[in-house]
Amino acid sequence: MDGMRVRRTAWASAGLLLAVAVGCTGGGDEGAPEATPASAPATTEKPRATSSPTPSPADPVSLPALMRREHTGSGLRLGAVLNRTSAYTRYAVTYEANGLTVSGIMNIPGGEGPFPALVLAHGYIDPDDYFSGQGMPREQDRLARSGYVVLHTDYRNHARSDKDPDNDVNLRLGYTEDVIGAALALRDSGHPEIDGDRLGLFGRSMGGGIVYNTLVVAPGLFDAAVAYAPVSARPQENIDHFQRPDGDPLVAEIEEKHGTPEEDPDFWRGVSPLTYADRVSEPLLIQHGTADDTCPLAWSREVSATFEEAGKDVELRTIAGEGHTFGPRWAAEMDVTEAFFQRHLR
């Protein structure tokens, strides 16, 4: 199954967790000053890259369980026109992902298609404050102007999407299911403007963790992926870095249900995409600023090293002096991002 291209059909091996129980802050306001969270604890354990590291049957909250699940994505519906520019039209959209309705926005370029499509996975924003399409406005605009259909998913529990009451305690697995569903819905849409055979994935911050998870759960679903200032690929590091210092009561719920890494190391290995690096088939570009005080650069270095060791096509670009949201070098790094997608999607 690994690396197999699946065209316009329900994907039979997809799904998974978002490697973070709370994700990086700052994803909702690209220009906002960044808060400095507590330092991430040192990690000495090295995950094992193997396609079957956990016994069968798999824990239902695990990557192997989600790999085995038959995922669906369909019913992409264009709703109200939110904006028209000289380059593209912006729509409110919904689609179905594993039985849930998920909302989002879509920018469709003007001119003659079909156009390659990108799914955008935004960073953490409190769902109570989130509005549809929030999180990556600069990227949405620029990529549509460059000739890409841009589908920015809101995720479940956000905006007009359906609710999933177990999502938080289950490490927000559902967000990655929503991204996989978005890709399947694009393939199945029937809209002549969308080329469902040319798909890219672009995630920032928490969305970067979704990128990693999608690549190991659904290899071959996308043609290429970019992770931009991503979170850790180890869920326990994200919990320790973002939630525990703030006294988030969700931490106790998670550990009561799933145990701590010391109590149940197999569970925590089973929810890290590092454990399944050998499944990745798409080229991956990681962009991370050296001055990022929200998501430590060391997290991206570990992912890059682990994927390289597994023989995967991964490139880590470290951007001198850039923080979590990217400022002075944003345009230049978007040039790099576009060139990367141009090579693999055009």
Image (cartoon, rainbow, N blue to C red):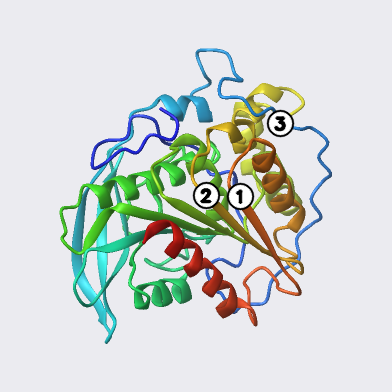
Classify 10 Å Cα crowding around label 3: few (below 14), some (14-19), many (20 and above). some
Q: Would you identify the image quadrant in which residue 34 lies?
A: bottom right
Identified by mark 2, the residue type is Pro
Q: Would you identify the image quadrant in which residue 327 lies?
A: bottom right
Q: Percent x, y for residue 145?
A: 36, 78
Q: Which residue is mark 2?
A: 283
Q: Which residue is mark 1?
A: 314
Q: Which residue is mark 3?
A: 47
Secondary structure of residue under mark 2? loop
How far separated are the C-alphas under marks 2 and 1? 6 Å
Secondary structure of residue under mark 3? loop
Q: Residue at left 61%, top 20%?
A: 53
Q: Residue at left 52%, top 67%?
A: 337
Q: Is residue 159 visible?
A: no
Q: Residue at left 46%, top 37%?
A: 166
How far separated are the C-alphas under marks 3 and 2? 21 Å
Q: Is residue 269 visible?
A: yes
Q: Percent x, y for residue 345?
A: 38, 58
Drawn side of residue 329 relative to residue 75, left or right:
right
Classify 10 Å Cα crowding around label 1: few (below 14), some (14-19), many (20 and above). many
Q: Are marks 2 and 1 in contact (CB under 8 Å)?
A: yes
From this view, report whether residue 111 is shown above or below residue 59. Answer: below
From this view, report whether residue 108 is shown above or below residue 178. Answer: below
Quadrant where the N terminus is found in the figure:
top left
Identified by mark 3, the residue type is Pro
Q: Disc 1 or disc 3, which is closer to the eye? A: 1
